[in-house]
Amino acid sequence: MRFQLTADQRQLREEVRTYAQERIKPEAIELDRAGEHPTEILDELGDRGYAGLTLPERYGGQGEGMVELAVLTEELAAALMPVASALALHLGVAEAIQRFGTDDQRERFLPSMAAYETVGVLGLSEEHAGSNKLDMETTAERDGDEWILNGHKQWLTNFLHGDYVLTYAKTGPDGQRPNNVTAFLVPTEAFEVEEVWDTLGARTVKSPRATLSDVRVPDDNRIGPVGEGYVQRGRLQTGINVPARGVGIARAALDDTVAYTSQREQGGRPISDHQGVRWEVGEMAERVDTARLLTLRAADRADRDLDTTREFSMAKISATQAAVDNANTATQLHGGIGYTSEHHVERYLRDAKLLTIAGGPNEGHKDTLGEAVYQDHPG
Ligand SMILES: Cc1cc2nc3c(=O)[nH]c(=O)nc-3n(C[C@H](O)[C@H](O)[C@H](O)COP(=O)(O)OP(=O)(O)OC[C@H]3O[C@@H](n4cnc5c(N)ncnc54)[C@H](O)[C@@H]3O)c2cc1C
C-alpha cells in the first residue's frame, strides 16, 4: 500500500497550485470584499482544461478521475473556496450528462461544458427540500414531446452566470419514492430569480432562488429515464469536491498560520516559540492530513468502482469540520489583525462554515456513517 499520488497527479497538483497561488489568491480578498463573480478566473480554468477534467477526451475532457478532481479542488479552494465550488458544481452537472445522458446529449452539451463555454447549475434543493431532497415540490408533467415544469429551486450556485440548470422534478406520486424524480436540463432564462441572498461566506459566487412557471422543456433535455433521476444521482461521485474544498481551506489556514506565527514577534520572540502555539499548529497539521487521507481514500475507491458510502461520509464530516476548526484557530493565532480582511483567515472561517451545511449537513452524513458501521458489524 502506497500513500502517494502518481507522478501525473503530483504534476497536476503543482500546476494548479502555482496557478491558484499566483493568480487567484492575490485577488481573493478584493473579490470577496466586492462580492464579485470570478468570471475571468473561471474562464481561464476552462481554457486550462479543468472544467472538463473528468470528462472523456472525445468530448474535450481530460479523462481523469475523482482523485484528480479532489487534487484540483483542494488547490482551488486553498486560494478562494467559491472558485472551487463553481467549477466542481459545473463539472457535477456535466458528469451527470456523461453518465446518464444519451450520445446525442453528450455531443450537444459536453464539448462546450468542457471548455466552460456552457456553464452548468445544480437544481436539486428547494425551500422545503434541503437535507431531505425527496420532499421536493417541483413537478414535471408530460405533454407530448414536452414536459411542463412548475415550482422553484434554491441555492442555485452558478445560476447568475450559468446556462443550464440540471433540474430535478417529481414525475410520479410520493408513493413511488425514490423512483418518482426525473432530471431535466432547463435553460437559466426559463427561470425567474426570486431572491439573491447576502451570505456569510462564499460571497463571490451567488446561490439564488428561482421559480419555474409552466416552463416547457423538450423531452430531448430529459437526462436519464423517467423516475430514475434521484436514484441515478446517488451513483455520481463528484460530491467528493465538498470534502476536498474542506481540505483546501484547512491547509491554507495552516500555511498562513505557520508563516504568520513564525514572523510575528511579541516580547522579543516569535509567537511560534510558545509551546501552546506549536501544539495548536501541530493539531492543525494533523487535521489536514486526516482530512486529505480520508478524502483521497474515498476518491480512490470511487475511481475503482468500490462502494464509498462509509468512506465518503467520513471524509465529508472530517474535512469540513477540519476547515472550520483550522480557520478558527488560524484567526485566533493571527490576533487582532486576523479579525480584519488584511489577512485571508477571517474569510477562511466564513467560507468554511458553508461546508458543514452544504452537500448535505454533517448530521445527515453522521446518520449515514452510523448506519454503514452497524451494517459492517452485524451482531
Ligand atoms: C451557499 C449555498 C450553496 C448551495 N449550493 C447548492 C447548489 O448549487 N445546488 C443545490 O441543489 N443545493 C445547494 N445548496 C443546498 C444545500 O445542499 C442545503 O442547504 C443543504 O443540503 C441543507 O439543506 P437546508 O439548508 O434546507 O437545511 P435543513 O434540511 O433545513 O437542515 C437544517 C439543519 O438541521 C440539522 N439537521 C438536518 N438533518 C439532520 C439529521 N438527520 N440529524 C440531525 N440534524 C439534522 C442540521 O444542523 C442542518 O444544518 C447550497 C446551500 C448553500 C447555503
Image (tube, grey):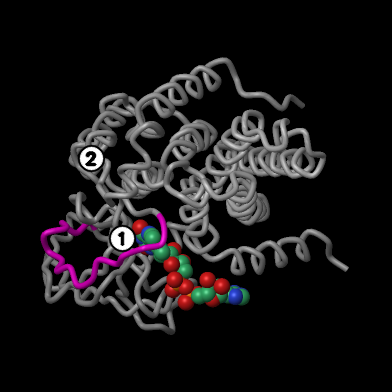
Query: Under 8 Å from ligand 1: the CB of mark 1?
Result: yes
Stretch of the chain drawn in magenta = 185-201
Front residue of 139 and 162: 162
x then y, percent, for residue 243:
56, 48
Asked if residue 178 can be seen in this view, the reply is no
x then y, percent, for residue 84:
40, 42
Residue at 39 percent across and 44 percent down: it is: 88
Q: In the displayed structure, does residue 85 sit left or right of residue 278?
A: left
Front residue of 320 and 297: 320
Res. 124 image quadrant: bottom left
**Label 2 element class:** helix
Q: In the displayed structure, does residue 3 sit left or right of residue 309?
A: right
Cα–Cα gap, marks 2 and 1: 15 Å
Q: Is residue 213 above or below residue 286?
A: below
Circle 2 sits on which residue?
39
Q: Is residue 169 above or below residue 188?
A: below
Circle 1 sits on which residue?
207
Residue at 63 percent across and 56 percent down: it is: 317
Residue at 53 percent across and 22 percent down: it is: 9
